[in-house]
Amino acid sequence: MMRPWVLPMLLVLCGSVVATGLILSGSTGAAVALLLVFVLLAGVNSPLIFPRSISAVEAQSRSSVDRRPVVFWRSGCMYCLRLRFRLGRRARQLHWVDIWRDEAGAAAVRAANDGNETVPTVFVAGRPHTNPDPEWVREQLSPPT
């Protein structure tokens, strides 16, 4: 449960240490600016940015009913973050599975990627797509015409 928070906590801790050093050397303004950058990086890499993660079994069940793609991701992954931001509000229409919280999700990703936990892996109609273009994922959300 704590694994997704390790990177954000390390970023805040490192930023605090560096900022303390800058304050002690008399650079208060630089310390505040640097600490703000580290806190923003921690926020971006935290699980708070992504929609609530569900289990792989639940995601696959929901996807079979509503035909929405399932995204397997993990915190700290810059490609997952890029996908999340480029999808904007439409990201909430997807089913998100954090592979660090769900072993079945991690197993599904390994099965789709030759034993590697490469994310984001997006399942559309049961077929895996590793690190797809965000525009393509957005098209998968559009109703067929």
Image: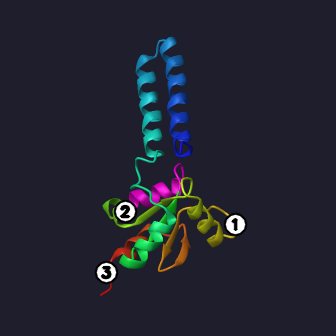
Identified at 46% across, 29% down, the residue is 34
Circle 2 SS class:
helix
Q: How is the image coloured?
A: rainbow
Q: Is residue 1 above or below residue 121?
A: above
Does the magenta portion include 12? no
Circle 3 SS class:
loop
Q: Earlier in the sequence, mark 3 or mark 1?
A: 1
Circle 1 SS class:
loop
Image quadrant in which the C terminus is located: bottom left
User: Disc 1 residue type?
Assistant: Gly
The reply to whether the C-beta atoms of the residues labelled 3 and 1 are less than 8 Å apart is no
Residue 120 seen in the figure: yes
Identified at 31% across, 60% down, the residue is 89
* Comparing labels 3 and 1, the label whose residue is closer to the camera: 1
The residue pinned by badge 3 equals: 143
x and y percentages locating residue 19 in the rendered image: 49, 22
* Comparing labels 2 and 1, the label whose residue is closer to the camera: 1
In depth, the one of 25 and 55 nearer the eye is 55
Instruction: Kindly report the distance in space between the C-alpha atoms of the residues bearing marks 2 and 1.
Output: 27 Å
Point out which mark residue 91 bears. Answer: 2
x and y percentages locating residue 103 in the rendered image: 59, 59
Magenta span: 74-86
Identified at 46% across, 44% down, the residue is 46
Does the magenta portion include 76? yes
In depth, the one of 141 and 78 nearer the eye is 141
Report the magenta stretch's main SS.
Answer: helix
Q: Residue furthest bottom?
A: 145
Q: Residues within 10 Å of mark 1 (few under 14, many from 20)?
A: few
Instruction: Kindly report the distance in space between the C-alpha atoms of the residues bearing marks 3 and 1.
Output: 33 Å
Instruction: Kindly report the distance in space between the C-alpha atoms of the residues bearing marks 3 and 2.
Output: 15 Å
